[in-house]
Image (cartoon, rainbow, N blue to C red):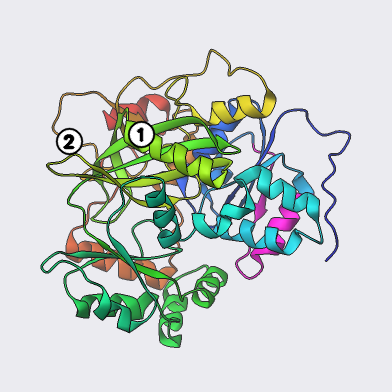
Amino acid sequence: MDQLDLSTSESASPRPRILLTDTNRWPVVARLAIAFRSLECDIAVLCRTPAHPVQKVSGISCVFHYAGHAPLESLRKAIETFHPDIIVPSCDRGVQHLHELHATSRSSNPKLAELIERSIGSAEGFPITSRRRELLELAQSEGILVPKLAPVEREADLREWNAEPGTPWVMKADGTWGGQGVRFVNNADEAREFFLEYGRHASVASLMRKLLFNRDWDWVMFDWYHSQRPVIAQTLIKGRPANCAVVCWQGKVLAGIAVEVVKAKGTYGPATLVHVVPGTEMMEAAGKIARRLRITGFFGLDFMIENGTGAVYLIEMNPRCTPPCPLSLGKGRNLVAALWSEMTGQPAPSNLPEIEQNFIAYFPKCGKGNGTDVNHHEPIHLDVPADEPELIRELLHPLSGRNVVGQLIDRMWRKQNQEPASVAVFKEKDNYTKKSVLGTLQ
């Protein structure tokens, strides 16, 4: 393998150079780009194209195409062309690709391997950050509360799993996100069904069905080749969900945000409305894990706060950016500014905007029936990128990952099940000025 030239060109800007990566089309990437841009960073993005929301954000140096049939080559090309100071992955697949590229570069291209470790931390922690079982076992060794868990490597493990009678289990598969790959099961038959779906290689029939309904065929093929995933079973902690997001440098937490989930999209889906809290136990857990794994960059932890006892149980880790990461909540809670300060050796600018409200509705998930219709008297910050009208339009009307057939099926399903669309709260479809967007939301 030819060694990449990672030297900085003479014309390069002295400003921090940030390469964001995303194999999905998640809004958090666009929000991160805006946050880094506010600190005058040079930003490039490696993402799915066409119609990634970040393409509607002004001030981005360049956008590279992330190809599912050659993800590592896409990543190498973006690094070689842009010469980033740091790489910020925004999805689990992107983290996996960095791990794989590091493994292939340690001997052939040490500079590239060093860049990856400078971006996401020590390689010794790579096998742990992306595997639920290993992460939770490490957390337990650090004195962090975790649910009772067991690996499910074969069907016989389901019979040996000694769960309390009548207690639901939570089955989880590695390498899944957004509520996928998580299911509550009440008996061994339901657990076996989940294991057969995720613990074995997906069938050709499953592949053909996804190719029929989805537009991104190269990523469908990538996921099919990686469809056999490690599975764990956990006891269900009855309580309310919470999470924290932190940014680290060589194992030290620079800043963090803790929230409790007020409302979410579906049973397993992402939060739509959150309440910012001190989250002392959550932040302590993040500090222990960051230090133990010597992490650099962003990561998030998901928790359950048990009913009655208030005990805080860690249930999983997201080794990448999560929705709170771009939020500007002031000193110690502005993750992007904290990373910028560490990279530049300068204090964060004092004129950065700060969110004052403790309740935050994530845009565009916070539509009618999805987060803003909560009966309480606390003010809500509606996290709308008001100065980016083209981005707002794109987020309200995103390109579906489904093709024409898949979109038709989805419309029929929503009509039958009366699922509220996240855009229902917006009355004006053509006027996306700051005043109209905030007015319709309020």
In the picture, measured across the screen, residue 145 lies left or right of residue 19, that is left
Report the side of 23 relative to 198 (left or right): right
**Badge 1, how many Cα within 10 Å: few under 14, some, many 20+?**
many
Q: Is residue 176 left or right of residue 248?
A: left
Q: Is residue 387 left or right of residue 198?
A: right
Dots 2 and 1: beta carbons under 8 Å? no
Task: Find the distance from the CA under tag 2 to the CA under tag 1.
Answer: 20 Å
Q: Residue furthest bottom?
A: 204
Name the residue type under label 2.
Val
Kind of residue at badge 1: Ala
Q: Earlier in the sequence, mark 2 or mark 1?
A: 1
Residue 398 belongs to the span the image colors magenta: no
- Which disc number belongs to residue 421? none
Task: Identify whether 288 is placed above or below 126.
Answer: above
**2 or 1: mark nearer the eye:** 1
Q: Position of residue 255 (x, y in %)?
A: 48, 29
Mark drawn on residue 374 = 2
Indicate the position of residue 370 as horizontal and vertical percent values: 24, 45
Instruction: Return the x and y of residue 105 as percentages of the image width and height.
Output: 75, 60
Looking at the image, which is closer to me, 35 or 254?
Answer: 254
**At x 89% / y 34%, what residue is drawn?**
10
At mark 1, the secondary structure is strand
Decide which of 157, 212 is in the foreground and name it: 157
State the quadrant of the C terminus.
top left
Q: Magenta part of the protein: which range?
A: 60-80
**Quick check: can you spot residue 85?**
yes
Callout 2: SS:
loop
Residue located beneath label 1 in the image: 258
